[in-house]
Image: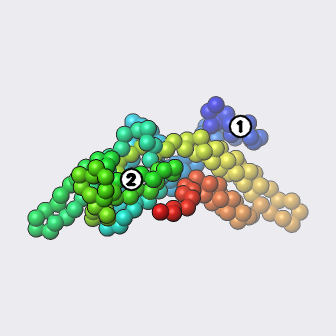
Amino acid sequence: MAILDRVKLRTETDLPDSELQLMIDEANQDVITRFGPHADPANPITIWLEGWREKLVLWRAIDITQPYTITEYMDWGSAGETVYVLQPADFKLWAPYNIVIQRWYGGDSARPRRIWGERVQIVYVPVNDGDQREEVIVKLVVLGIQYDAFKSQTVGDISGETTDYHEERRQLMNTLMPRHGMDIA
């Protein structure tokens, strides 16, 4: 079901579809701006992290069913920069969340190290959270419609001004924040 249809099911409004679609597009862009692009196997994301530590923590989990690459960069000063595309034996991706990556120093690693190099580039497809994002977008649009309707009304001495809208909107957006659980290692 299209987001527009879901919004119409959840609220009564006399706004035309074109206005509702603008509100949907704005909410969608707010989600992308804050949490990054939607998961799309055809368009993996690229992130850079500072190294010099044992573990890297990603903002969004890696979809391990899709290909991903981890590249380590070491700057040797006048000798130049060395680039290593790491193999799976060179790091450990900690399940079940797939957000913690530990530099591996044992086993079959061709480049064993206890800490990451200076900079690390990770190219991957994040776990698809599209259903959750869509639900937040619908709720943001419904909240906006309700807020606009309330704001334009006056009942007795009470007008529609409220700061609760911004708090509710913030709470809705925060539901998309990753929950990493505990890291005990």
In the image, farthest residue toward the right: 156
Mark linked to residue 99 = none
Residue matched to label 1: 8
Q: Quadrant of residue 104?
A: bottom left
Amino acid type of the residue tagged 1 in the rendering: Lys
Residue at figure coordinates x 59%, y 40% from the top left: 131
- Amino acid found under the numbered disc labelled 2: Lys
In this orientation, which residue lies closer to the viewer: 24 or 17?
A: 24
Left or right relative to 30: residue 77: left
Outermost residue on the front side: it is 107
- Asked if residue 76 lies left or right of residue 4, the reply is left
> Where is residue 3 drawn, in percent x and y?
62, 37
Tell me if residue 178 comes above or below residue 127 in the rendering. Answer: below
Q: Residue at x 21, y 55 (%)?
A: 83
Relative horizontal placement of residue 135, taking residue 37 as reference (left or right): right
In the figure, residue 82 lies in which quadrant?
A: bottom left
Does residue 132 appear left or right of residue 38 in this picture? right
Residue sitting at the far top: 1
Is residue 143 depicted above or below 14 in this figure?
Answer: below
Chain-order first, disc 2 or disc 1: 1
Q: Find numbered disc 2 in the image and state the secondary structure of the residue it sits on.
A: strand
Q: Is residue 121 visible?
A: no
State the residue at coordinates (31%, 52%). Answer: 107
- Residue tagged 2: 92
Q: Secondary structure at mark 1?
A: helix
Q: CA distance from mark 2 to mark 1?
A: 46 Å
Which residue does the image show at 73% across and 36% down from the upper left?
9
Residue 171 location (% of width, % of height): 65, 59
Q: Neighbour class for label 2 at 10 Å: few (<14), some, many (≥20)?
A: some
- Residue that extends furthest to the left in the rendered view of this protein: 79
User: In the rendered view, how is the structure colored?
Assistant: rainbow
